[in-house]
Amino acid sequence: MESNNTFFSKKCSQSNFITRTTELENFTSIEDITFSLIQTVSTSNKTFINRLDEENNAITNEAFENLTDSIREIGLLNPIYLLKTEKNNYIIVSGWRRFHALKEIYKIDENKIFSQKAIILKKETPPKLLETISINENTKRKDLTLLELSYKFNKISKTKGTSIEDCLKQFNIGKSQFHAIKKAMDFFPIIKENLLEIVGPIKANFLNKILEKLLIIYPESKANSLILEYSKKTKEDLKNILKELIEDTTKKNNSFEIKKNNKMTILKIKENLTEEDHMKIEIFFKELFNKQ
C-alpha cells in the first residue's frame, strides 16, 4: 500500500501542479471512493464549480456518456478533490464531471470501490490553495473549455485583494494568455462559439479585433465569412491584417465625428449631404429611438 505522501507526490507530478507537494500534504488525506462517500457530497454549493452549462444538460451529452463508460470499463484514472465542510459533509473542489459519472455508476452497482481516488481537503485549507487546485488541475487536464476559464478568470479578477500578478502566479499562465482568455467572454459569437477552442485565446483575440473593424466596412455575413478565412492564417498575418484595417477604417471615419458624454451624443458629419441623405438619416434615428 502506498503512503499518502508517495501517492500525492505522484499525483502532483502527473497534474503538474504549481503548488508545492508539501503544502498540499498539510491539508489532505486520501480515501477510497465508495457509495457512502458519494452520498455525503453536496452539489448545492458550487463555489468551485467552473462550468457554465446546467447540470442536467451536462450529464446527458455524448461526452459525459463516454466519460461514464470509460470509468466503468477501465476505472477512475484521475481523483476527485473534496473539501470537508463544517457540517461534516463534502463539496466538490475539482472533478465535477467525474463525480456525476460516479453517481451514474453507483445507480447500478453500490458496491463498487475506487481505491485511493478521493483527495480529501481539510476545512482549514486556505481559499487560495483551493482555487489553485480547482483551476490548475482543470487547466492542465483540459476539463474546462477556454470560455469556462474566461468566466472563472473574470470571477477571480473581481475578488477583492486579488491582483493580476497573484492570478498569474497562482495559475502558472503568461500575462498575454491570461488577458486573452479573460476577454473571451465578450468576443463576438462566431469567435466565441466556433473558433476559440480551435485557434486558441491569443489568435482568437486578434480575430475578434479584426471582426470589429470588418463590421464597419462589410455586412455581417461577409465579415463573418472573412473571419473564417482569416482563422487559418498565422498570428503574424493577423497582425498585418489588423493594421491595414485600422488604417482603412480610420480613413472612412474621417467623414464624421462622434462626441458623447453622460447626457448627450453629438454627431458631426463633414460632408455636403443631399435632401435624400438627410431623409435617410432622419428615418434611421426615428427607428433607432423607436419613434413613428
Image (tube, rainbow, N blue to C red):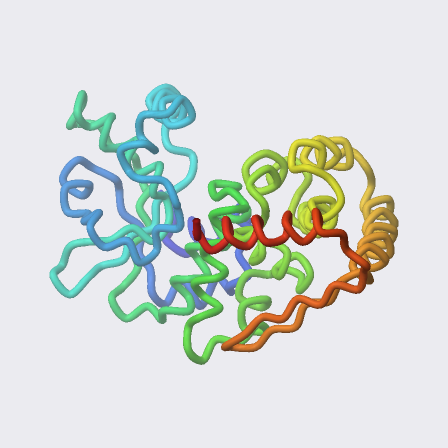
Q: Residue at x 53, y 66 (%)?
A: 170
Position of the N terminus by quadrant: top left
Q: Residue furthest bottom?
A: 161
Q: Residue furthest front?
A: 275
Q: Quadrant of residue 175?
A: bottom right
Q: Position of residue 150 (x, y in %)?
A: 51, 53
Pick the front one: 2 or 188: 188
Position of 244 with respect to 189 (left or right) is right
Q: Quadrant of residue 211?
A: top right
Pick the front one: 159 or 14: 159
Position of 68 with respect to 244 (left or right) is left
Q: Position of residue 103 (x, y in %)?
A: 23, 32
Position of 42 with respect to 223 (left or right) is left
Q: Position of residue 209 (x, y in %)?
A: 71, 52
Q: Position of residue 201 (x, y in %)?
A: 65, 48
Q: Residue at x 66, y 43 (%)?
A: 200
Position of 31 with respect to 238 (left or right) is left
Pick the front one: 212 or 289: 289
Q: Taking 60 as reference, is 235 above or below it?
A: below
Badge count: 0
Q: Residue at x 36, y 69 (%)?
A: 127
Q: Quadrant of residue 74?
A: top left
Pick the front one: 175 or 125: 175
